[in-house]
């Protein structure tokens, strides 16, 4: 795997509500900026371009590269955002090229799950690991697949879309299928299921506290989500012999509650391997994984 560049890079994490930017060097975020995401193409590009220029003006050295993480299906080679559910005005837009024109320099682009995986591969918990899967538990479930030390995009850029793998719970998913992992194990799905089971709405951290105190309903939510997570992970393990799974997103802090059920399923379903062969760990970069990964895309 390539050693991370020592140069100063700018990472852009484009989200549905906020654009987060950072100056990144040696895996550290030296300066940050956050602006609201305008929901119109030209205003959005302008907001990103001026934020990059303001950060560059603060920097002690010239920027070596600029990269961005986008929330949707992306063709990284072409720099095109193919489909973004929460930013549909960017669908099919050559976002990297349009931003590069405004900045007068190249911009790299990739899906946010891929960028997070790349950040962990470069300077996080995946550093030096040839093969691993990054799973992001957020509003949905996303991911990024590192194979042989390189980002695996697949033919259409959709590899690592781990959230729509089919598991045994049978509930409907927004994509039209049933049983998708994200319909049971995304941070949002766990909160929704907990609200039904406990009769009150709780953020995930409070649900974790309930589980810690021994609330059987809260524990059951995590156990079901963890079992389905294990089913999806075991399919990945069977196909690719992946042993390391890293977790990011708002659901990563409850990994300790998901892990026992997931490992139990992995132990049972991963032919020739046992639970001891697998590691399910939180990423090291936390919420900065996408930002830092974006900076290293270029
Ligand atoms: Zn689905």
Image: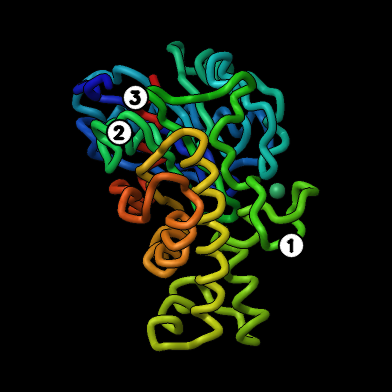
Instruction: Bin the neighbour count of mark 1 within 10 Å (Cα to Cα): few under 14, some 14-19, many 20 and up.
Output: few
- Which mark sits nearer the N-terminus, 1 or 2? 2
Q: Secondary structure at mark 1?
A: loop
Q: Residue furthest front?
A: 272
Label 1 sits on residue: 171
The answer to whether residue 19 is visible is: yes
Residue 146 occupies which quadrant of the picture?
top left
x 53%, y 56%: residue: 229
The label shown at residue 236 is none
Q: Secondary structure at mark 2?
A: strand
Instruction: Bin the neighbour count of mark 3 within 10 Å (Cα to Cα): few under 14, some 14-19, many 20 and up.
Output: some
x 75%, y 47%: residue: 175
x 58%, y 14%: residue: 78
Label 3 sits on residue: 149
Q: Left or right: 265 with respect to 40? A: left
Q: Tell me the quarter of the image containing the N terminus.
A: top left
Label 2 sits on residue: 23
Q: Secondary structure at mark 3?
A: loop
CB at disc 1 and ligand 1 closer than 8 Å: no
Q: Nearer the viewer, residue 107 or 235?
A: 235
Q: Left or right: 160 with respect to 255? A: right
Q: Residue 22 in the image: state x and y as whole percent.
A: 34, 37
11 is higher (above) or lower (below) than 180: above
- Which mark sits nearer the N-terminus, 1 or 3? 3
* Number of marks present in the image shown: 3
Contact check, label 1 and label 3, Cβ < 8 Å:
no
x 56%, y 18%: residue: 79
Q: Residue 51 in the image: state x and y as whole percent.
A: 43, 33
Instruction: Bin the neighbour count of mark 2 within 10 Å (Cα to Cα): few under 14, some 14-19, many 20 and up.
Output: many
100 is higher (above) or lower (below) than 205: above
CB at disc 2 and ligand 1 closer than 8 Å: no
Residue 157 occupies which quadrant of the picture?
top right
């Amino acid at each position: 795997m390539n050693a991370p560049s020592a140069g100063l890079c700018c990472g852009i994490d484009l989200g549905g509500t906020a654009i987060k930017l950072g100056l990144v060097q040696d895996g550290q975020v030296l300066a940050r900026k956050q602006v609201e995401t305008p929901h119109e193409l030209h205003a959005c590009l302008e907001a990103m371009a001026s934020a990059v220029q303001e950060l560059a003006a603060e920097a002690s050295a010239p920027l070596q590269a600029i990269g961005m993480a986008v929330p949707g299906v992306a063709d990284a080679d072409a720099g095109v955002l193919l489909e973004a559910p929460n930013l549909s005005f960017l669908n099919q837009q050559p976002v990297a090229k349009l931003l590069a024109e405004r900045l007068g320099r190249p911009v790299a682009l990739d899906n946010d799950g891929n960028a997070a995986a790349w950040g962990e591969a470069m300077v996080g918990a995946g550093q030096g690991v040839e093969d691993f899967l990054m799973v992001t538990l957020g509003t949905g479930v996303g991911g990024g697949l590192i194979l042989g030390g390189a980002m695996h995009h697949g033919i259409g850029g959709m590899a690592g879309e781990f959230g729509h793998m089919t598991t045994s719970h049978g509930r409907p998913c927004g994509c039209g299928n049933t049983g998708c992992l994200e319909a049971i194990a995304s941070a949002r799905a766990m909160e929704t299921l907990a609200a039904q089971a406990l009769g009150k709405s709780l953020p995930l951290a409070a649900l974790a506290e309930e589980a810690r105190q021994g609330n059987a309903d809260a524990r059951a939510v995590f156990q079901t989500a963890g079992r389905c997570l294990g089913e999806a992970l075991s399919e990945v393990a069977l196909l690719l012999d992946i042993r390391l799974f890293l977790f990011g997103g708002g659901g990563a802090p409850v990994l300790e509650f998901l892990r026992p059920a997931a490992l139990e399923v992995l132990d049972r379903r991963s032919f020739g391997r046992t639970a001891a062969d697998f590691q399910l760990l939180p990423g090291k970069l936390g919420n900065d994984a996408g930002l830092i990964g974006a900076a290293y895309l270029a």
